[in-house]
Image: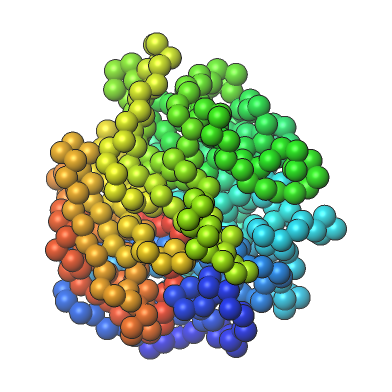
Amino acid sequence: MTTPEILLDNVDFGENPYLNDAHEPLRSELDNPQIKIIGDVPKDFSGIYLRNGPNQRFKPLGMYHWFDGDGMIHAAEFREGKVFYRNRWIRTKGLECEIEKNQSIWPGLMGVPNRNLKDNWGSDLWLKDNSNTDITIHGGKAISTFYQCGDAYIVDPINLETEGTLNIKSSGARQMSAHCMTDENNGDLLFFDYSTKPPYMTYGVLDKESKVIHHTQIDLPGARLPHSMAFTRNYSILMDLPMFWDPLLLEKDIHKVTFYPEIQSKFGIIKRMASGDTVKWFEADPCYIYHIINAWEEGDEIVLDVCRMSTPVPKSDIRNKMSGPYGSMLAWLKLDAVYHRYRFNLVTGKTKEESMNDVLSEFPTINNKFLGIKSRYSYHVSLADTDVILFDGFLKIDSNTENIQKYKFPDGTFGSEMQFAPRDNSKSEDDGYLITFVTNLVTEKGEIQVFSAEDLSLGPICKIIVPQQIPPGFHSSFVYSEYL
């Protein structure tokens, strides 16, 4: 039976394309509603697929950007061939304040900073921390994070209740950027943050008990906008990339993101528990990187696989096509990333880089048991040719053979970032399943779909229909059965 915990009246969000159609926010939270299953749910795996994403609660102040929406987690729990769905807003401090006032309080990414507000988050302390970006499993709990730095919210992965935030400030840390990462080998959580004021970056490590066991400053030449980091068994990899706020305008409290193609990309490699002054920097061609695939050690080299954007600012033809009041936002959200590999030689200090293929793809994931060690397979989304970001298919890329398996969704249906779920007693890297949420504009009902990770081109093994739409979102994670 459908048991909504919260059922809200609809909000008139206007014509913003990121608040309508596929991206229209949900107004309800469901807990184990009645579902319909098409096909057979595999019984040889268990766990929970979690996905975070924006779901705006109140009418926004000014121009709404997709990154502004209040964080909402959707969950699909698999147990002995049964599936349970639920969704919850993340009860951030900012959202709780807005619920009390019954209105939006903070300006969004495309707004003007309101320096009169008492509480603010983000790298320049003027945004609301909506915790809508990533979801990481650490110590059996889900940790949700905000793309431009904020608190790390602790969420129960089963009932999705918000339990508070990680206590990192008492150990001298500031905030946590979106892409913190858990090392499945020992339970460490590695994180960084960045700021418009010195120190421009900090880096830290939490142990499996969520205690800060290392924190250090990283010297950068100015305010930067790094999005991700990577790690190997012994090292962490931080980024100083040439797309960041115009420093002269930033002095006037104007946040204009600019790409500087005359500046080299820099990758800082540091031993996991070392002081920031020991970072070794490697230079590479100018680019921007939203998401990494994996990193590992090979002899004297660190190998880093990423989805790399060579032209992170909108091209002129895209700018010309995207007109109207939302044109700038739509243009900036166009992604042209491809699979790229770096090799950093720790002895010579040299960088080698190569494009692994020319297929546009993003939001890569792997079997998380292989994070930090050599991996072969990665799972990516393909981007639909639409004004707004939608994922119209999936790719499985074999970095050994360069073979690419492809699956394309039927018209009107779009996926989410996939997660790998290992089979019970799995024997190989891709011995398991891929899980995703699907936005179905034809039926107007959301779906949970399960694919074979060995051959995703065969299409879904089963579809689980839930009684409400599931809008597109950002990042996801998988909770292994041993945490349940």
Q: Is residue 212 visible?
A: no
What is the image's colouring? rainbow
Q: Residue at x 60, y 69 (%)?
A: 324
**Residue 211, x across and y down, in percent:** 56, 39
Foreground residue among 32 and 135: 135
Q: Report the side of 185 relative to 321 (left or right).
A: left
Q: Report the side of 324 relative to 336 (left or right).
A: right
Residue 400, by quadrant, is top left
**Residue 25, x across and y down, in percent:** 52, 76
Q: Report the side of 354 relative to 60 (left or right).
A: left
**Residue 236, x across and y down, in percent:** 46, 30
Q: Residue at x 40, y 11 (%)?
A: 348
Answer above or below: position of 430 versus 217.
below
Q: Residue at x 29, y 75 (%)?
A: 411
**Residue 138, x across and y down, in percent:** 45, 48
Q: How many numbered discs sit on the rendered protein? A: 0
Figure quadrant of the C terminus: bottom left
Q: Residue at x 61, y 74 (%)?
A: 57
Foreground residue among 438 and 286: 286
- Which residue is most to the top? 348
